[in-house]
Amino acid sequence: VTSASQRRDSLAVDEAAKKLISVTTRPDLLEIGRVAIAQGIENEILTETVATPNRKKLVEAATANYFALIEGVSDSQIQERKNLQVAAVQLVRHLLELNRAGEAKSIVEQLLRVASDDRMVLKTAGEVFSAVGDLKGALKVYRSLASGVPIGSEDWLIAKLGVVKCLRL
């Protein structure tokens, strides 16, 4: 539950970030502004726990913001900057929620080129490949995830569950 003061603070940060984006051409400041806006939208999405028209609008807004954040970003920039990887993963998750799995797959493929050992990327890639029916791709990333984490850990269990789901289909 968000308090009124938290909501006011969130709106103030959002307005400041929008103003920053409107007056700067520096890539680092644009990135900071877009990340702040994304965080505000994500906080709003968390308050909408069920599928509502408002949640869909928020997810669409987040998707547009994440596209703006990673647009024109090179593989090396994504590899070097964790916040861009997180933004790309969030974009992929929102694309899946909006039933745009094809778009999500191309972004995941880029992420796998630059962060193939990142657990967050591997879990998301498994979800995307499963969603588009690429069971061979899903099995590959789930097995890669399982081999890179301690046996019995949460990520290991997620990977093993993903493998089982793929093999059942």
Image (cartoon, rainbow, N blue to C red):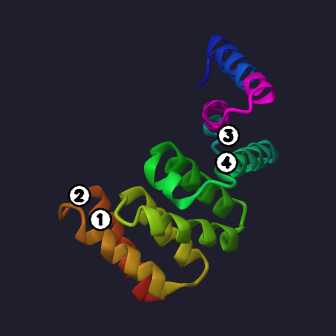
Q: Which residues are magenta?
A: 18-44
Q: Earlier in the sequence, mark 2 or mark 3?
A: 3
Residues at circles 3 and 4 in contact by the CB criterion of under 8 Å: no
Residues at circles 2 and 3 in contact by the CB criterion of under 8 Å: no
Task: Count neighbours of disc 4 (C-alpha within 10 A) and say few if under 14, some if 14 to 19, many if 20 or more.
Answer: many
Q: Nearer the viewer, mark 3 or mark 4?
A: 4
Instruction: Tell me how far mark 3 sits from mark 1, CA to CA.
Output: 28 Å
Q: Earlier in the sequence, mark 4 or mark 2?
A: 4
Residue at label 4? 66
Q: Quadrant of residue 11?
A: top right
Q: Is residue 93 magenta?
A: no
Mark seen at residue 157: 1
Q: Nearer the viewer, mark 2 or mark 3?
A: 2
Element class at badge 4? helix
Element class at badge 1? helix
Instruction: Tell me how far mark 3 sits from mark 4, CA to CA.
Output: 19 Å
Which quadrant is the N terminus positioned in?
top right
Residue at label 3? 48
